[in-house]
Image: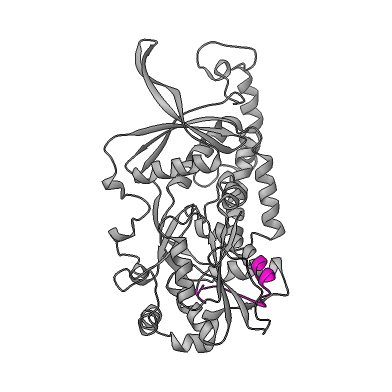
């Protein structure tokens, strides 16, 4: 992890005036306006930019804009490896999906940002931390729960809940765009792209503005990280992911050959040369492959933690592929009881992450449980991508629980004797038989 302040200069202490604040700064509309507004109110603002793999932003340019827009200093922290290894992997291995669909690329990153904000505040002597989340969203909760879990004495400036700020920007994005124009500020958002984005290594999200109409189709302009499925190539792209203890550590070529088995002409795939090695490189390769094949787009209306419904457009190409592949390999390597327990716990784990309770002991316990299930999730998954679809065409593992000699419908062995199923079924039917005998035929029977 590296840290840079200004143009590579060491960070200096704040003024000590009691009005020094570290702002989680993205360079977007909200944080640009908030930065300038706080500076105009006399705050000494440290703009902290967390490098978590933003793909449609230039972090150096954002930092320079921060200085021009009123920051006393800016700090860039490289946290890409930390995001992947300590935040993404537990959610991937736990198959976290909020309301069964959303992969929470934004939710995962918020506690990491909060962690580094608190650290930077201590280093520069700032008394306050601030964020750009509105009073209507989830992120205000995620940020502030993170701040207070890590430092219960720190002061929080929730700018979007400040009555003076609300009064000045009561018209929302329109008034903020007017403010930007009035003060000559530099920002990515414009009237031509009236929506908010959040971009990191794992995904990009779009919400607000014209997207607040849930019937409206996603505009073509939001496809910055991936191609639309209808514009993806007309050929299938195949590759193999090699896993070690639940971690995708290598991507290799999938090489086809023809073979005849029991009179059936088959296309059989072997592994070829290595395409990427290591968690970061493998994620990057898979993310790019999924993006060019239109995989990973989700539009949905979800239930925000604060109570309202919200429409979001999400693009998580690599995460989508890895989730499908990881779940498939677990089907080979884990017992049914562990799989069922993981799936039973998943909604609770996902909800804790979504609502910003990453540092809650219950969330830590979920992560510990998930980690304990991964020791045998080692093997290979063969992936096929085509026009927005991801298919796991094959899987194998030296520690897999599938046994051909037991599962085959041909032949008989001592390990599994078919006649034993009679007693198995009779015992399991006992409660049903007793109910029918004692209470009669049930409704719907």
The picture places residue 4, in percent across and down from the top left corner, at 57, 62
Q: Position of residue 23 (x, y in %)?
A: 56, 73
Position of residue 312 measured from the top left corner of the image (x, y, whole percent): 41, 62
Give the residue displayed 61% in from the left and 77% down from the top.
Answer: 21
Residue range of the region highlighted in magenta in the rendering: 118-136
Q: Residue at x 51, y 69 (%)?
A: 25
Q: Give residue 65's quadrant in the image.
A: bottom left
Pick whichever, 267 or 81, lies toward us.
81
Q: Is residue 46 left or right of residue 31?
A: right
Image side of residue 112 versus residue 168, left or right: right
Using the rendered image of the protein, determine whether residue 291 is visible from the camera's viewpoint. yes
Residue under the point 52% across and 17% down: 408
Compared to 405, does 187 lie above or below?
below
Front residue of this view, candidates 7 and 248? 7
Q: Position of residue 330 (x, y in %)?
A: 57, 35
Q: Nearer the viewer, residue 29 or 124?
A: 124
Residue 218 visible in the displayed image: no
Colouring of the image = one colour
């Amino acid at each position: 992890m590296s840290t840079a302040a200004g143009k590579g200069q060491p960070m200096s202490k704040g003024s000590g005036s009691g009005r020094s604040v570290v702002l989680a700064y993205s360079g977007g509309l909200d944080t640009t306006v908030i930065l300038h507004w706080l500076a105009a109110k006399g705050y000494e603002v440290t703009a902290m930019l967390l490098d978590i793999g933003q793909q449609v932003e230039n972090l150096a340019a954002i930092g320079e804009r921060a200085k021009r827009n009123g920051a006393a200093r800016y700090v860039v922290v490289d946290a890409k490896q930390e995001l992947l290894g300590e935040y993404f992997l537990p959610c991937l291995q736990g198959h976290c999906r909020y309301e069964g669909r959303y992969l929470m690329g934004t939710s995962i990153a918020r506690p990491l940002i909060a962690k580094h904000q608190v650290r930077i505040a201590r280093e520069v002597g700032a008394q306050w931390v601030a964020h750009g989340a509105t009073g209507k969203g989830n992120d205000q909760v995620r940020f502030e729960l993170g701040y207070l879990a890590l430092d219960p004495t720190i002061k929080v400036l929730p700018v979007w809940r400040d009555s003076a700020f609300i009064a000045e920007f009561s018209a929302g994005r329109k008034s903020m765009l007017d403010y930007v124009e009035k003060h000559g500020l530099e920002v990515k958002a414009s009237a031509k792209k009236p929506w908010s984005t959040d971009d990191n290594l794992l995904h990009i999200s779009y919400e607000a503005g014209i997207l607040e109409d849930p019937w409206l189709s996603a505009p073509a302009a939001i496809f910055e990280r991936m191609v639309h499925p209808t514009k993806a190539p007309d050929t299938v792209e195949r590759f193999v992911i090699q896993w070690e203890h639940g971690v995708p550590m290598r991507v290799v070529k999938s090489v086809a050959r023809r073979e005849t088995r029991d009179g059936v002409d088959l296309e059989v795939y072997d592994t070829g040369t290595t395409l990427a090695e290591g968690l970061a490189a493998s994620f990057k390769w898979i993310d790019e492959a999924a993006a060019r094949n239109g995989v990973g787009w989700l539009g949905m209306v979800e239930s925000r933690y604060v109570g309202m419904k919200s429409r979001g457009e999400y693009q998580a190409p690599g995460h989508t592929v890895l989730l499908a592949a990881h779940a498939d390999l677990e089907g080979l390597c884990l017992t049914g009881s562990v799989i069922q327990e993981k799936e039973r716990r998943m909604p609770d784990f996902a909800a804790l992450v979504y609502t910003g309770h990453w540092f809650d002991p219950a969330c830590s316990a979920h992560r510990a449980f998930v980690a304990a299930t991964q020791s045998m999730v080692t093997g290979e998954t063969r992936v096929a991508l085509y026009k927005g679809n991801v298919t796991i065409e094959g899987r194998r593992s030296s520690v897999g629980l599938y046994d051909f000699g037991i599962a085959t419908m041909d032949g008989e062995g001592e390990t599994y004797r078919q006649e034993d199923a009679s007693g198995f079924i009779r015992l399991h039917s006992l409660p049903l038989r007793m109910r029918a005998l004692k209470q009669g035929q049930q409704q719907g029977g």
